[in-house]
Image (tube, rainbow, N blue to C red):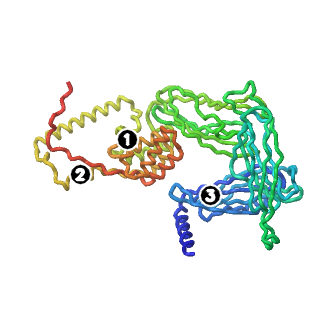
């Protein structure tokens, strides 16, 4: 008992520490279309909101609610451990048609609204309906093309409680079969009986044309013992069910099929975000989204922009969101591209184009994005990829850096000269050089008149000078956090190197200078995302967490200057 109380106390402590984590809430249905007499499961997941359950009251007007459940677990969060809770409720529609599921309140968060299509006619009774247990299988397309992704669904119907069981779908010869997602569970009225349905989804891909025979799906299990069986010591009845085998007519590759071959039901492309301007040497961000009906991410070609004259393109890893709707797979692909111009003048991006085959219409189709045009501006100002960083953040970072200027690894300013022109910059540089030369001359004359100043200082004074030499200006943490969230990876690496005192020469030197192992690993993740095909989203999250309190630097040993002149004075240039 004491051990259980200790574990509960530890869980409660960890949960309390995580209540300040950033709350994330989402909702989804296990199916978007159902028939009359069926139920659907609504799932709500929230992270960081301990003790907050959804308010399902707005649903009672359109649904009968039953079989609600919940579970919670500890997961890594942005600020340490967080509590992730999932709530499920079974919904039975009161009417047919399109039913809107409103946004639900979960603590201080709200879910996104959803929609459910309810057919007015009940589904046809499957073969075997009326028995205690029966099983069926079906494909979303009985005449698919070669290498088309076919949604294959196996449904187990049970009118009695099950104690254990196993569903088996043998792999057909001449095709690949892969399970997709988790099982869906709901209720359906069939042949005057109420059945619990377990729906298992597969992805079937034919490898050759002709007739394709899919073996029958099988079920073996045992029913839960009834009251009399429990008294008599029984263990329930053995149950077996077998679906009827199915056959598909696989069509050959069409003569006018586009290459690469991509049989789909639908494909749409759109820009999630586009840069307003391009500037030499600054990275701008462009995000492309593809929504595909009838395939998973592994079957699709890579999202890649066409070449852009005078602009380097650096893609980040593709983010995928797989689903299963209308009995077949769907996927949404999102990819971010960093555009870095190398010259000024006009440039143009020809829209991304993807050719595919319409399996329903039996003809080739093409989806394309509109072209984009820019006039690349000269270097100067803040990076176009992060407009929110441009003014306030750049100034705040400049105040945080040594000398009040955002410097790069070589000590040069991150932003270019003001609009006054290059000539004024060189004039100021020449005046500054002359002033420094005069100051050096005055200092040398002073040393000649005060030779005692060349003597070595006491140890205490040398230590104080060394500690003063490594002292750095505190970093503006909110500005640094905003820069990590919005700037491109090259800019993030440049600023981190510049925050060192003196600035780090490269990424290797930056890693050596950082004292916190988590920050060193975050910089390595940043390098992998920039050059090694790493996960850009994960790297940004790791940087955000590691540098939440600003960078932590190692102490730099200061070498005292020798009081003796150099043995071989440098020669003047000839």
Label 2 sits on a secondary structure element that is: helix
Quadrant in the rendering for residue 445? top left
Q: Position of residue 553 (x, y in %)?
A: 36, 51
Question: Which quadrant would the C terminus be assigned to in this image?
Answer: top left
Quadrant in the rendering for residue 62? bottom right
Q: Position of residue 277 (x, y in %)?
A: 52, 34
Task: From this view, report whether residue 415 is shown above or below residue 343.
Answer: below
Q: Nearer the viewer, residue 455 or 355?
A: 355
Q: How crowded is the residue under tag 1: few (<14 C-alpha within 10 Å), some, or many (20+)?
A: many
Q: Pointer 2 and pointer 1: residues touching (CB < 8 Å)?
A: no
Q: Nearer the viewer, mark 3 or mark 2?
A: 3
Q: Which mark is residue 46?
A: 3
Q: Nearer the viewer, mark 3 or mark 1?
A: 3
Q: How crowded is the residue under tag 2: few (<14 C-alpha within 10 Å), some, or many (20+)?
A: some
Mark 2 vs mark 1, CA separation in Å = 24 Å
Q: Does residue 369 appear anywhere in the picture?
A: yes
Mark 3 vs mark 1, CA separation in Å = 42 Å
Please state if 67 lies on the left or on the right of 159 as rendered.
left
Q: Which residue is mark 2?
A: 465
Q: Position of residue 214 (x, y in %)?
A: 78, 42
Task: From this view, report whether residue 498 is shown above or below residue 208.
Answer: below
Quadrant in the rendering for residue 268? top right
Label 3 vs 1, first from the N-terminus: 3
Label 3 sits on a secondary structure element that is: strand
Q: Which residue is mark 1?
A: 407
Residue lying at 65% horizontally and 40% vertically, measured from the top left: 297
């Amino acid at each position: 008992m004491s051990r259980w109380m200790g574990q509960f106390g530890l869980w409660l402590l960890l949960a309390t520490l995580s209540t300040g984590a950033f709350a994330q809430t989402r909702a989804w249905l296990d199916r978007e279309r159902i028939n009359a007499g069926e139920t659907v499961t609504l799932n709500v997941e929230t992270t960081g909101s301990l003790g907050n359950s959804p308010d399902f009251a707005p649903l009672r007007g359109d649904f009968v609610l039953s079989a609600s459940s919940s579970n919670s677990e500890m997961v890594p969060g942005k600020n340490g451990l967080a509590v992730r809770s999932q709530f499920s409720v079974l919904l039975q529609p009161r009417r047919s048609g399109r039913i809107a599921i409103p946004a639900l309140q979960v603590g201080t968060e709200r879910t996104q609204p959803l929609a459910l299509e309810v057919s007015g006619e009940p589904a046809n009774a499957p073969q075997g309906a009326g028995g205690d247990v029966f099983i069926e299988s079906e494909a979303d397309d009985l005449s698919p093309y070669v290498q088309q992704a076919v949604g294959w669904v196996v449904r187990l119907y049970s009118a009695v409680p099950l104690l254990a069981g196993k569903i088996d779908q043998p792999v057909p010869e001449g095709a690949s079969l892969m399970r997709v997602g988790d099982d869906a569970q709901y209720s359906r009225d069939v042949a005057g009986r109420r059945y619990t349905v377990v729906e298992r989804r597969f992805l079937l891909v034919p490898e050759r044309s002709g007739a394709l025979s899919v073996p029958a799906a099988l079920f073996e299990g045992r029913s839960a013992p009834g009251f009399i069986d429990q008294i008599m010591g029984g263990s329930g009845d053995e149950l077996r069910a077998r679906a009827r085998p199915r056959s598909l007519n696989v069509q050959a590759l069409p003569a006018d099929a586009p290459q690469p071959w991509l049989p789909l039901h639908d494909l749409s492309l759109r820009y999630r975000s586009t840069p307003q301007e391009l500037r030499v040497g600054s990275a701008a961000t462009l995000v492309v989204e593809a929504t595909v009906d009838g395939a998973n991410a592994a079957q699709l070609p890579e999202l890649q922009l066409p070449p852009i004259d005078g602009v380097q393109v650096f893609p980040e890893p593709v983010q995928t969101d797989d689903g299963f709707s209308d009995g077949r797979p769907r996927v949404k692909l999102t990819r971010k591209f960093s555009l870095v111009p190398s010259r000024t003048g006009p440039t143009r991006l020809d829209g991304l184009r993807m050719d595919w085959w319409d399996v329903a219409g039996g003809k080739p189709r093409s989806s394309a994005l509109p072209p984009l045009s820019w006039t690349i501006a000269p270097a100067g100002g803040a990076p176009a990829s992060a407009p929110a960083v441009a003014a306030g953040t750049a100034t705040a970072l400049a105040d945080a850096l040594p000398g009040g200027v955002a410097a790069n690894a070589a000590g040069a300013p991150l932003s270019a000269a003001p609009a006054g022109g290059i000539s004024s910059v060189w004039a100021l540089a020449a005046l500054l050089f002359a002033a420094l030369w005069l100051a050096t001359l005055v200092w040398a004359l002073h040393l000649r008149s005060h030779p005692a100043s060349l003597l070595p200082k006491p140890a205490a004074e040398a230590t104080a000078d060394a500690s003063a030499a490594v002292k750095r200006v505190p970093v503006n943490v909110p500005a640094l956090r905003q820069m990590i969230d919005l700037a491109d990876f090259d800019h993030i690496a440049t600023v981190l190197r510049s925050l060192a005192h003196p600035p780090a020469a490269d990424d290797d030197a930056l890693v050596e200078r950082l004292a916190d192992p988590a920050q060193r690993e975050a910089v390595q993740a940043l390098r992998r995302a920039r050059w090694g095909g790493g996960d850009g989203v994960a790297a940004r999250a790791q940087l955000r967490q590691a540098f939440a309190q600003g960078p932590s630097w190692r102490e730099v040993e200061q070498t005292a200057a020798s009081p003796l002149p150099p043995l071989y004075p440098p020669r003047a240039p000839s």
